[in-house]
Amino acid sequence: MHWSRCPTPPSLLSDLALQRLRPPSSVAWAEFLNASANGRMERDFALLTLTDTEQRELYEAARIIQNAFRRYKGRRLKEQQDMAAAVIQRCYRKYKQLTWIALKYALYKKMTQAAILIQSKFRSYYEQKKFQQSRRAAVLIQQYYRSYKEYERIKQGPRGPGALNTIGSFLTKKQDQAARKIMRFLRRCRHRYTSGYCSVTRVSIPALIELKPVVPNQRPEDKHDLKQEKISIE
């Protein structure tokens, strides 16, 4: 393909070029008028036009350039979109990871607080129960100690009839308490026996009562009274 070359005109936008332009002379005007009259100008303009084949080739070349430029721009745009999508995905994964870590920390904190609360409640319950047991044991020890001191005081007191009566009433009270405890035990055993849990052998109440301490130098009538009390308990 042959391209027609035409002279490039001077730049009219340059101030320097405008200053250097000179008005045409009379000879130049005469040649211009003669050339236009002789058809020289039409021939020069005809050289600047393209044939159909050249125009088609030029159109195809322009179309190929435009397609290549569009593909280049599309590829650049796709690369930018891929990079933006990768950044968005990375930020979203980081956000999800941080959210999950925060959720796990909140759950762990709640579980820790619940465990601390349960432990404190259990310690309080255990200490309260231990205190109640210690208090019951102290009350029981005090009761036994008072009974022992009362028994020792009566034992070391005068041996007159009043003292013997006091000792007899004290022993009767102790025997009554022992008899009540034994009867409660027998009722529980009888209930278990009838329910089929276990079988209980009979216990001799007089034998258990005989284990209580006997006051020395006791009169025969006091012994007779104690025997009557044993019979009534039986």
Image (cartoon, rainbow, N blue to C red):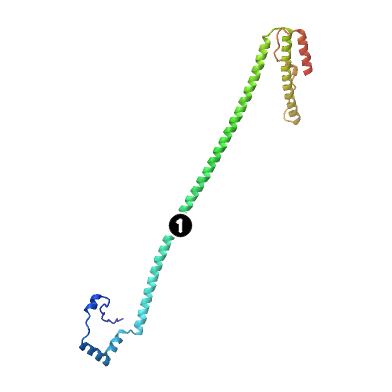
- Can you say which quadrant of the picture contains the N terminus? bottom left
Picture residue at 39% right of the left edge, 71% below the top: 70
Q: Which residue is mark 1?
A: 89
In the picture shown, does residue 84 fall above or below 172?
A: below
From the top left corner, tell me how far across and down residue 81 is, in percent: 43, 63
Tell which of 38 and 86 is nearer to you. Answer: 38
Crowding at dot 1, Cα within 10 Å, few <14 / some 14-19 / many 20+, comes out as few
In the picture shown, does residue 45 fall above or below 130?
A: below
Q: Can the viewer see residue 234 in this picture? A: no
Tell which of 193 and 217 is nearer to you. Answer: 217
Looking at the rendering, which quadrant does residue 91 occupy? bottom left
Looking at the rendering, which quadrant does residue 29 occupy? bottom left
Looking at the rendering, which quadrant does residue 193 occupy? top right
Q: In the shown orientation, is residue 200 left or right of residue 101?
A: right
In the picture shown, does residue 216 fall above or below 142?
A: above
Type of amino acid under label 1: Gln
- Can you say which quadrant of the picture contains the C terminus? top right
From the top left corner, tell me how far across and down residue 216 is, in percent: 70, 8
Q: Can the viewer see residue 173 in this picture? A: yes
From the top left corner, tell me how far across and down residue 188 is, in percent: 73, 27
Hey, which residue is sitting farthest bottom in the picture? Answer: 38
SS class of the residue under badge 1? helix
Q: In the shown orientation, is residue 113 left or right of residue 91?
A: right
In the picture shown, does residue 103 fall above or below 196?
A: below
